[in-house]
Image (cartoon, coloured by chain):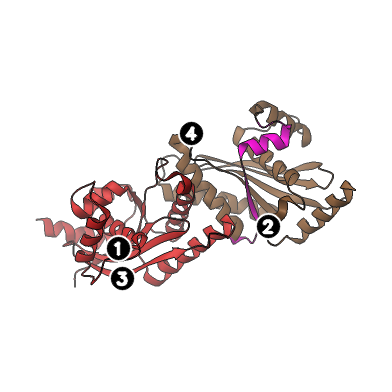
Chain colours: A red, B brown
Amino acid sequence: MASALRVLGIDPGLTRCGVGVVDVRADRSATLVHVGVVRSATDAPIEQRLASIAAGIRAVIADHGPDVVAVERVFAQQNRSTVMGTAQASGIALLLAAEHGLPAATHTPSEVKAAITGYGNAEKLQVQTMVARVLRLDALPQPADAADALALALCHAWRRGPAAGGAVAALTPAQRAWAAAEKATRR
Amino acid sequence: MASALRVLGIDPGLTRCGVGVVDVRADRSATLVHVGVVRSATDAPIEQRLASIAAGIRAVIADHGPDVVAVERVFAQQNRSTVMGTAQASGIALLLAAEHGLPAATHTPSEVKAAITGYGNAEKLQVQTMVARVLRLDALPQPADAADALALALCHAWRRGPAAGGAVAALTPAQRAWAAAEKATRR
């Protein structure tokens, strides 16, 4: 089997934080490793909610050992009432990547849609359908946060390569092997 | 000497994160314990920047053992270009409080100004002047982020008490002693 890049995609959120792990090979084929949602109690103090999210993400990293972490980029313009909690959760996702020695990257929703469907304004359902097809799932991944996390992970693997890896100072052995294999495929 | 509540105030930021530790007694008198700024390199990847901020806050908690952490509340409306980084840093500050078993609280800039000067629209200089006076400093605390962190810490101690502590499920022994002493003073 060809060397695969294991990507943890995180759709940050305070109430529901989507997490998806996929193995992506140089020929762009992909396998589902894990998908789920990390939740926090809406009536808990904010610091406890963030600690719950952190514990859930740490467990996924420990259980599945990703090579890289991809986090959806949050904008101030998005859904105002929850955007601050989403930004806080995204900060924690990125911090945990750094503290596990993993490279991290952020991608915008448009980038994810374009990478998955070829169209930056694609409908959510189109993205989910394509994710299910690529991963050979029998049903659409549920809930939406989990589906978004899988799309983000696929997007990250598909968008990167020698050029997209520029921001990553040090590649892991798995990433180097993947980049070399991908380059070979392109010839 | 009366029992004091040791408050860590954090003015969250990605480039400069203000940290201030004060001991506040039940008679509202206060002593400076530590003030500083945790920085991150603006050219580092976001996950490394957040890790630098986390390491700096952890060091302050380890060195000074606060009873409680007060973090400035971030709004989506604030300074757009940096608000997401500020929100991410605030999430990390709150997470670190939880992971050290410390209660945390957030206060808005208006609440801080009102608590320190009696006026929610006070100028920055008025707040800094009052902070310097209360802590008997020879000069205004610098830079502004550090001054804001001290103001936040004082605000937290002064605003709380039996009523304001409602959101804190479990008080530390020092907080209980402080609340009791404050109650005695009020009689």
User: Closer to the camera: disc 4 or disc 3?
Assistant: 4
Q: Give the spatial CA distance, label 4 vs label 1.
A: 40 Å
Badges 1 and 3: C-beta atoms under 8 Å apart?
no
Q: Nearer the viewer, mark 1 or mark 3?
A: 3
Q: Which residue is mark 1?
A: A173
Q: Chain of mark 3?
A: A
- The secondary element bearing badge 3 is classed as strand
The mark lying in front, picked from 4 and 1, is: 4
- The magenta region covers B99-120
Residue B114 drawn above or below residue A113: above
Q: Give the residue at mark 3.
A: A33
- First in sequence: mark 1 vs mark 3: 3
Residue receiving disc 4 = B79
Asked if marks 2 and 4 touch (Cβ < 8 Å), the reply is no
Which amino acid lies under the numbered mark 4 shown in the image of this protein? Asn
Query: Gap between marks 2 and 4, in whole Å?
Result: 30 Å
Q: Nearer the viewer, mark 2 or mark 4?
A: 2
- Coordinates of residue B116 in the picture (x, y in percent): 72, 35
**Is A92 included in the stretch rendered in magenta?**
no
Residue with the mark numbered 2: B168
Q: Chain of mark 1?
A: A
What chain does mark 4 sit on? B
Position of A133 relative to B90 (above/below): below
